[in-house]
Amino acid sequence: MSLPFTLFDIRVTVDAIEGRSVCGLAVGDYFEVTHSSQVRIPAGKHFCLYAMSAIMPLIPAKQRLLASNDWLERDTLVACPDPEERLIMRIERIHSRTLDSTDLT
């Protein structure tokens, strides 16, 4: 039985670096999470694993519509855990996609 539901594809972009970029990221660098769980990084680019780890717990919530008064619906900025970098990332929804829950676990 088909059980369709909607998720958003997500783009995480380096919005600001208020310290020094130890990991080599620059403002504008990004990665995307598409098709529920596929991570895409532009060819020839990288994204710091530790910066990614700060944002990953928020991705499932940002992939879904939440109540308008939920703080996760409104907040879009996340800080990297490295205090010397003070790297700020922005989460944005870039595309909505209908998936079938029978295709996923």
Image (spheres, grey):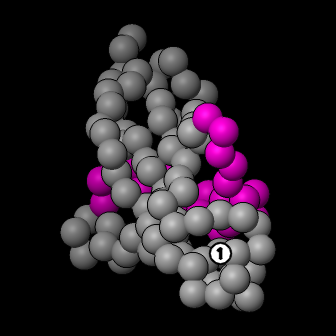
User: Does 105 sit above or below residue 74?
Assistant: above
- For residue 75, what is the image quadrant? bottom left
Taking 55 as reference, is 82 left or right? right
Characterize the local packing of mark 1: few (<14), some (14-19) or many (20 or more) Cα atoms within 10 angstroms: many
Asked if residue 77 shows in the view, the reply is yes
65 drawn magenta? yes
Which type of secondary structure does the marked residue at label 1 adopt?
loop
Choose between 73 and 50: the one closer to the eye: 50
Taking 9 as reference, is 24 left or right? right
Taking 46 as reference, is 74 left or right? left
Residue underneath mark 1: 80
30 drawn magenta? no
Please give the range of residues in magenta: 43-66
User: Does 95 sit above or below residue 85?
Assistant: above
Residue shown at 50%/77% (left/top)? Answer: 16
Residue shown at 76%/67% (left/top)? Answer: 23
Asked if residue 39 shows in the view, the reply is no
